Amino acid sequence: MVRVRAAAAPEAITTLSAESRADAGLWTTWIGDESGAGVIGLAIVHRSVALPGTRLQAGAIDVEVTSGPLGDDPGVPGKQGPATVTLGRRS
């Protein structure tokens, strides 16, 4: 999962493609960014396109990856455990 940015949002969850990979992933969530100049969101993408600056396509919408993989990355040496994300806890 990575953060993404685009000038517009799709109408529904949509597939992403890259020049190097037709099945690059899925754009799953989005919201208007604070400047009002576009949208930011999250996408589930193939590791080969999970690099900041990578350009993807969601139909006619240009999408830019703005982060590396979120959470633990089991593909990186020294991090061979499962990926985890800690959510809020009740006291």
Image: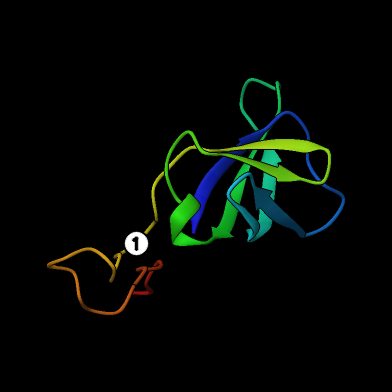
Question: Badge 1: how crowded within 10 Å, few (<14), some, or many (20+)?
Answer: few
Locate residue 14 relative to residue 16 in the image: left or right: right
Which residue has dot 1 on it? 71
Q: Nearer the viewer, residue 23 or 58?
A: 23
- Residue 43 place in picture, x, y as percent: 59, 55
Quarter occupied by the C terminus: bottom left
Q: Compared with residue 60, is residue 26 higher up or lower down, i.e. above or below? A: below
Q: Secondary structure at mark 1?
A: loop
Locate residue 22 relative to residue 14 in the image: left or right: left
- Residue 20 place in picture, x, y as percent: 58, 49
Q: Residue furthest bottom?
A: 82
Q: Residue at x 63, y 20 (%)?
A: 35
Q: Compared with residue 30, is residue 46 higher up or lower down, i.e. above or below? A: below
Q: Residue furthest left?
A: 78
Locate residue 30 relative to residue 8 in the image: left or right: left
- Residue 89 place in picture, x, y as percent: 37, 72
Q: Residue at x 18, y 69 (%)?
A: 79
